[in-house]
Image (spheres, grey):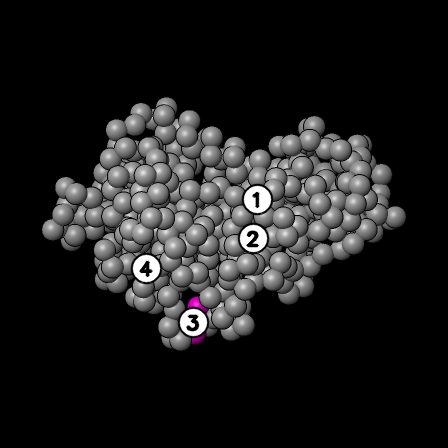
Amino acid sequence: MPPDRSTLITQIGELVTNDPDQPGFAAVADAALVIEDGTVAWTGPAGQAPAADTAVDAGGRAVLPGFVDSHAHLVFAGERSAEFAARMAGRPYAAGGILTTVAATRAASDDALRANLRRLAAEMLAQGTTTFECKSGYGLTVADEARAVALAAEITPEATYLGAHVVPPEFAGDVAGYVDLVCGPMLDACAPHARWVDVFCEDGAFGADEAAAVLAAGRARGLSARVHANQLGPGPGIRVAAAAGAASADHCTFLTGADLDTIVSTGMVATLLPGAEFGTRQPYPDARRLLDAGATVALATDCNPGSSFTSSMAFCAALAVRDMRMTTQEAVWAATAGGARALRRTDVGHLTAGARADLILLDAPSHAYLAYRPGVPQVAAVWQAGRLAAGSVP
C-alpha cells in the first residue's frame, strides 16, 4: 500500500495513543485511526471515523504504537551460546566476554556483518519494533568501528558510536592510550555516520574520568551522549551521564539514593534492560523505585550476542511486569513512548495526529496480553511510516 493513500483502521478494541498531552499511558476503547501520507491523520471513536481510500477492520483487536528500542548492539559476528550455558550452570557474568565477539567481528566481512544486522532488524520489525538504536563496539579499531557505525547508519538514523565498550587486548595496560584513540582518529572516522556517543562506564571497562573524556570528545563533534551506567555494581556512571547531558543512562541496576535524585532532577531517562538480567542472573533494576520517585523509564532489549540475545520488546515488557514490578500500562509506555524519550524523538512512541504512522496490530484485545501471554506470538501486523511492513491484516 503506497503511503500517500489513506487507510482507516476501525473497530479497534483498545487504541493505545500515549497522547503526549496526557501523563503516561493513554488509551481509547472502540476506536479508529486514519493513516495518510505516512502519518497519523486522525484518531477517535470508531462511529465518528472519516472515510478513507482503504479500510481495515481490526475486529476488536488492540492497536499500539510501534515499539521503540533505544538500546541494541546488532553489528557483530559469531555467537556465545556456550558462554550462556556455562553462566546458567553457575559461572558468574563478567564483561570480558565481549572480547570473544570482538575477535569474531574483526574477522568477518562487511557482507557478513550486514547480513546479520539486517536479519536481526527484520526480526525486530516482525515483533513490532519500528524504531531502534544500534551501537558499534565490537570492532575497537579505527577501521572496524568505522564500518560498524556506517553499517548501522544504513538501516537506522539512531546509530551510536561505542568505541569505548571495553579496552581491546592490544591496549592491555594502556587504557589512556586507547582513550586517546577513541577520542581522536576513531571518533574522526565514526562521527560522520553517528548520532550518538556512548561509553561503558563500569569496573573492568572505563572509569569516570575516561568516560567523561570520551563523551566530551563526542559532544564536540556534534554527537549526543548516552551511557552504560551502574550495570555490574554501584559506580560513577549516573553522575558522568548527568554531567554530559546524556539523554539516557542505561541499565541502572545498582542505584544509590544520590543516583536516583540525579536521574529525577535532570530529567534523564533511565533505560532498563531486563533481558540482560534474565541472561546473566543479575538482580533486576528496581523499576518501581524509579517510577515512584518520578523518573522517566524506558525499556529496551539490549540485543547482543553475550548478555541479552533477544530482539523481543514484548518479552522485555513481560519481564518488566513480572520481575520489575511495573504495571502492564507502565511497561507498554516504557517500550514505546519511553524509548522515544530516550532517543529524544517526538514523532514516534505515540499515536496522535501528526505522529509517524508506526503501529502494531495485536492479535489480542488488550495491551496487557503482552505480559499476560508471554512467549506467544501476538503481533498480527506492523505498519511503519504508513506502510504495512510485516504480518497481514484481517
> Eyeballing the image, is 304 above or below 208?
above
Determine the secondary structure under disc 3.
helix
Q: Is residue 314 visible?
A: yes
> Eyeballing the image, is 329 above or below 85?
below
Q: Which residue is mark 3?
A: 260
Do tag 1 and tag 2 residues touch (Cβ < 8 Å)?
A: yes
Determine the secondary structure under disc 1.
loop
Q: Amino acid at mark 2?
A: Ala
Q: CA distance from mark 3 to mark 4?
A: 17 Å
Looking at the image, which residue is at 68% across and 43% down?
Answer: 362
Do tag 3 and tag 1 residues touch (Cβ < 8 Å)?
A: no
Looking at the image, which residue is at 39% across and 55% down?
Answer: 281
**Mark nearer the viewer, 3 or 1:** 1
Q: Is residue 281 shown left or right of residue 317? A: left
Looking at the image, which residue is at 16% across and 52% down?
Answer: 175
Do tag 1 and tag 4 residues touch (Cβ < 8 Å)?
A: no
N-term mark: 1 or 2: 2
N-term mark: 2 or 3: 3
Q: Which mark is residue 318?
A: 2
N-term mark: 2 or 4: 4
Q: Residues within 10 Å of mark 4 (few under 14, many from 20)?
A: some
Q: Which residue is mark 4?
A: 232
Residue 261 lies in the magenta-colored region: yes
Residue 204 lies in the magenta-colored region: no
Q: CA distance from mark 2 to mark 3?
A: 24 Å
Q: Is residue 158 visible?
A: no
Report the magenta residues as a range: 259-263
